Image (cartoon, rainbow, N blue to C red):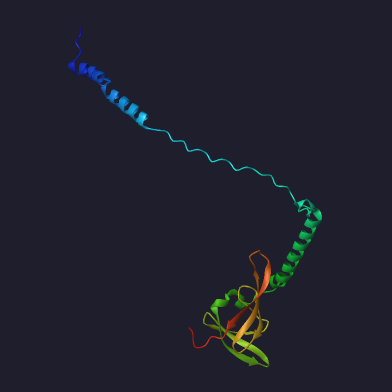
Amino acid sequence: MKRLPLGCLIFAVVPLFGCNSSGQDDLRQWMAEERAQTKSRVVPLTEPKQFKPVLYAAENNLDPFNSLKLTQALRRDSAQVASNAALIAPEMARRKEPLEGFPLDTMAMVGTLNKIGHPTALLRVEKLLYQVQIGSYLGQNYGRITEITETGIQLREIVQDATGDWVERNASLALQEGDKK
């Protein structure tokens, strides 16, 4: 019979020492103590609110789904769309003027002239000087000059409001005092 080397014998016997239950007994005892000390706490549920039925009293009111009412609302909306389209359509059909490429806040009114009874304003835009008259367009919101005075320019712009409808609003450019470069 062959003898096993001593190293193989040690490797075979050592794992058996790990099976000793003395470490597990301490663990089991600790777990039992913890279970005995731990008390479960159950929070009681609040009582549900009592449901009280309410009678529907709007039986005699107008039906919100009435087809006549819907037709009137659609007719009113289409009239608004038509008026909005009529407001912006002429602006979309015409050729844009050079000063419509710049926002109003980049323009400065620097003076006025009176050419043959027609008031003319002088505007400085990007270090260039432009002459504009009543009816000229400027700014990026379809602005049209309605009045030129010695102290400023009044114009009407067409812009979209928060609901997307086109509306008119007034804007102005005041005369810039002093030399601003």
Q: Residue 36 or 23: which is nearer the viewer? A: 36
Tell me where residue 9 appears, x and y as whole percent: 21, 16
Q: Quadrant of residue 106?
A: bottom right
Residue 6, by quadrant, is top left
In depth, the one of 145 and 39 nearer the eye is 39
- Residue 163 falls left or right of residue 27: right
In this picture, is 43 found above or below 124?
above
Q: Residue at x 68, y 92 (%)?
A: 117
Residue found 26% across the figure and 22% down from its top: 22
Q: Residue at x 57, y 75 (%)?
A: 103
Q: Nearer the viewer, residue 59 or 97?
A: 59
How many numbered marks, from 0 up? 0
Q: Locate residue 96 relative to residue 28 in the image: left or right.
A: right
Q: Nearer the viewer, residue 179 or 47?
A: 47
The location of residue 66, given as percent across then percent down, is 79, 53
Looking at the rendering, which quadrant does residue 159 occupy? Answer: bottom right
Check the image and name the residue furthest to the right: 68
In this view, the residue farthest toward the top is 1
Q: Position of residue 153 (x, y in %)?
A: 62, 84
Q: Does 63 sit above or below residue 156?
A: above
In the picture shown, does residue 164 fall above or below 175?
above
Q: Quadrant of the N terminus?
A: top left
As drawn, 47 above or below 125: above
Residue at 81 percent of width and 56 percent of height:
68
Residue 138: where, in percent of width, then height? 62, 78
Left or right of 14? Residue 106 is right
Left/right placement of residue 45 relative to residue 54 reads left
